[in-house]
Amino acid sequence: MTDTLDIVARTVVWNRLISVCEEQANALMRAAFGAIVREAGDLSAGVFDAQGRMLAQAVTGTPGHVNTMAASVRAMLEVVPPETLSPGDALVTNDPWLGAGHVFDFVVVTPVFLNGRIVAYLAATSHIVDVGGRGWSAESRSVFEEGVTIPVMPLRRGDALNEDMLRIVETNSRVPHEARGDILSLLTCNDTGARQLTALMAEYGMRDLDDIAAFIFERSAAGTREALLRAPQGVYRNTLALDGYDSPIVLKAEMTVGDGRIDVDLAGSSPLAVRGINCPLNYAAAYAAFGIRALLAPEIPNNHASLEAIRITAPLGLVVSAERPAPVTARHVIGQALPDLMLGCLEQALPGEVLAESSGALWTIALSGAGAVPFTSLNVALGGMGARPGLDGLSTTAFPSGVGAVPVEAAEVAAPLIYHSKEFAPDTGGAGTYRGGLAQRIVIGSRHDDPLDLSAAAFERLRSGPAGRQGGLPGAAGGVEITDGTRIDDKGIYRIPAGERLILQTPGGGGYGPPDQRDPRAVARDRTHGLISDGAATNIYNQKNHQEET
């Protein structure tokens, strides 16, 4: 009975640790200056043990932030040893190869002291809109052009902020007040988590987290091993093609499913790109591991032990394993395509159990003032998610990142822009027994009819849409144009002339299963709601024949 009670109590504490992370994330969203964090949830927060191993993460957040942060804490402690830290201290970096893959994401780590010794660390990551350089652009030829990089250093010593570091960031940023505020919001986030954690430990009379860490890691390792055994042992290979920048990008994976673990080799993927769409291996591994866990182990909490069973490797010098000083601003174009690459391998292992391809990378809408009113606006456009076995795909859903878009009202308040329309794009979801998720169509212009500058760094799948599965058709490819007739078909920088508007249509998700096997009632419902056209209902789904047969 005592053992049972111990297990129950430990499970309760485990869940309470996750709630501490959620308190962190909520504090960050309340304190953040940038709308991409405050409104869209582009962040991560987590609790780590005294050895820097992740115990729990917030549900709010992206795999690219969370899974890179899982390794960031120990990497930062190798630079600044724990024995040099004191109560009140906090460390910071935006090094892409230690953090979340590009210079816009800052990681802050705060040690938690109890009775004079470190018992845990709180860590948080979020996106800073501008840190200098070329800004949100893939035009850079090296990371040195992309903005200021802050090596691992103290953000705070005791109760004294590192004003020298903050001034460096402010001096290099086009929006210095916002950049400073966003970095300090990470500090507030961790301080909130530290208070919650020490209160939890006091409530349960805990002097350290060693016992609960051992429990979490043991249960997570065992659960992950059992979940991975669902996939038959073997070697599976998959290839995925992307638009790339100057030339197409090919991603290749060889997945070896062993006895309760999975190893993935990304060798054979395209070599390093000249422009800033390269992906550091830490970010590539974060999203590749997420794709595997999303299918095989979705119920197992994400932590150090559950991530240990999946190993992602690649020879250095590829687009998925960029080395310094490669340009990496739009690294998510590559990184967020990797879950679909992993799912394509797993489809061979578990045919009929894997969703169709999704639109993948977020389309980042990076607009800046090119006229009398200077500003920088960052938002995201969401595409369709692939159809699932037995279910339609989710429309305008950020899979795999999980973030939301900045609401139109908030975006228009923060910058002199007008969102003239934002709506579902009919017929963009891949046809199938289960339809792919729909894309969206967005029209944006200047409130003052001034010219705008657009960075198209993250516009992907403009040439071909996400593939269907099990006989389903591909989702629609994306499209971007300016009302003056200019068609945007690469990842460069474009000028939107005064009085003109930007029109975006994101990619749709792939369909699942043969379209002629779709329930006629579902076709009729989609037609009534305007999700598909009359032509698609008749010519693709053959609804008329279905009605005659029934």
Image (cartoon, rainbow, N blue to C red):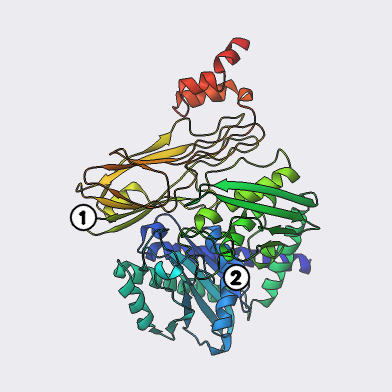
Q: Residue at x 31, y 48 (%)?
A: 409
On screen, 350 above or below 59? Answer: above
| Along the viewing direction, whichever of 206 and 105 lies nearer the viewer | 105
Image-based side of 174 in relation to 196, left or right: left
Residue 425 in view: yes
What is the tally of numbered marks visible in this picture?
A: 2
Quarter of the figure that contains the C terminus: top right
Mark 2 or 1, which is nearer the eye? 1
Under mark 1, the amino acid is Gly
Under mark 2, the amino acid is Ala
Q: Residues within 10 Å of mark 2 (few under 14, many from 20)?
A: some
Q: Position of residue 282 (x, y in %)?
A: 58, 65
Q: Quadrant of residue 419?
A: top left
Residue 18 in view: no
Tag 1 secondary structure: loop
Q: Position of residue 239 (x, y in %)?
A: 64, 47
Quarter of the figure that contains the N terminus: bottom right
First along the sequence among labels 2 and 1: 2
On screen, 373 above or below 510? Answer: below
The residue labelled by disc 2 is 71
The residue labelled by disc 1 is 371
